[in-house]
Image (tube, rainbow, N blue to C red):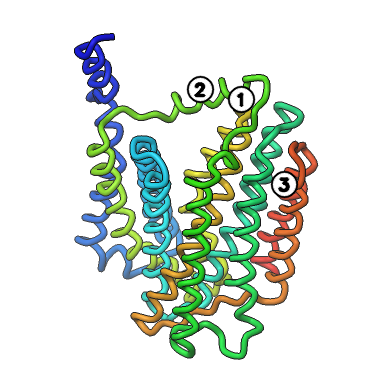
Amino acid sequence: MNQRETFGSAAKATALPLRTLLKMLVPAATGFLSVLVCHLYQDSLFSELANYPRTVLLFLWLFGTMMWCAFGVVRHGEAVAERLGEPYGTLVLTLSVIAIEVSLLASIMLHGENNPTLARDAMFATLMIVLNGMVGAALLMGALRYWEQEYNLAGARAFLMVIAALAVFALIIPNYTKTAPDPIEAPAKALLFAVITVLFYIVFLIIQTMRHRAFFAEPESDGAHELLGNEIEEHVRQPGSLGFHIGMLLLTLAPVLLLSEYLAIIVDFGLEGLGLPDALGGVMVALLVLSPEGLTAFHAALRNHLQRAVNVCLGSALATIGLTIPAVLIIGLITGCQVHLGLDEVQTVLLILTLFMSALTFGGVRTNVLQGTVHLLLFIVYVALIFSP
């Protein structure tokens, strides 16, 4: 192939059809239109929240728009990650998703009465949704279709080792120290917790993207996995240049950050005005952040590409707990908001049980229906305990 043909092929690969461009612009345009409507009619829209049917519709509109934009952010983030390579691609995608979560947490924390347990509830919800809900559903769907599935044992163990250490360090140890790492009561300890948590994540990121990348690759088999992996890459590959996807990522991310302030008004009303369980705020934040990656994991499991599903699920949990808690603690230091990280007794037992079951699930090289079913049952228990602690 000569130079002219090579240039033509590259240009064709980055060419963006008008229909595709418009499809990518719709979520951002809808998001900015929603921001404009909320800004212009804020007094009338949010003045009568006691009108429950209207408030529910308002919540569904804002949450649905933010969810739509979040899917767009993840899609463009994956395109940027593909073009930049590792570790920069992973960082861009991770920071984009974490920006959504931190903006939501900050908005809810700073609106109305301070909710000191919101960050803790969001972290706990993330772990329960990922390790029990997403992992359980992915394993069950894959097992029902392929009977048994393989994954890279070394990669799964690496994920779980760091997740378990961070979960215990951030969500259990604060209950057993003389002074909790609260930004108001113990700012030095809060800063120390934030720094150590970030260091945990940075060390793992270096291991994952540089030193031991093979740990997180699909295990070698008869070639079926390699073929399926190529099919998935073709399925998710997006046309357009690097600059285009970076611009679209920022453009699609902006309305999510702006709408979080208005969604916080409704969430605050539900938690304080209606007396809904405080844990629901954390669940809502976790669902908004994890939904795009959850669908990616399910599609990968159904294509018999379990290692990709494991990387997406466990990577989401690790990135969330590794970066969101430091961000929230720093916000607390700056604004003077209280942040309580320690779980209560029931949550602590459920977290330890989940980590133990996850270690057993990923203790071999194959998964089946049993593991998926057990994790889904644990997830049902978690949801039931929210409404009946």
Badge 3 element: loop
Horizontal side of 174 relative to 17 (left or right) equals right
Q: Residue at x 38, y 40 (%)?
A: 81
**SS at mark 2?**
helix
Quarter of the rendering occupied by the N terminus: top left
Q: Which amino acid lies under the numbered mark 3 shown in the image of this protein?
A: Phe
Mark pair 1, 3: CA separation:
19 Å
Counting residues from the start of the chain, the first of labels 1 and 2 encountered is 1
Q: Quadrant of residue 47?
A: bottom left
Q: Earlier in the sequence, mark 3 or mark 2?
A: 2
Where does the image place residue 251, in percent across and percent down from the top left?
Answer: 25, 47
Categorize mark 3 by other alpha carbons within 10 Å: few (<14), some (14-19), many (20+).
many
In this rendering, would 217 be left or right of 17?
Answer: right
Name which residue lies at 67% across and 37% down.
151
**Circle 1 sits on which residue?**
225
- Label 1, label 2: how many angstroms apart (C-alpha)? 10 Å
User: What secondary structure is found at the residue carrying circle 1?
Assistant: helix
Judge by depth and name the residue closer to the eye, 219 or 67.
219
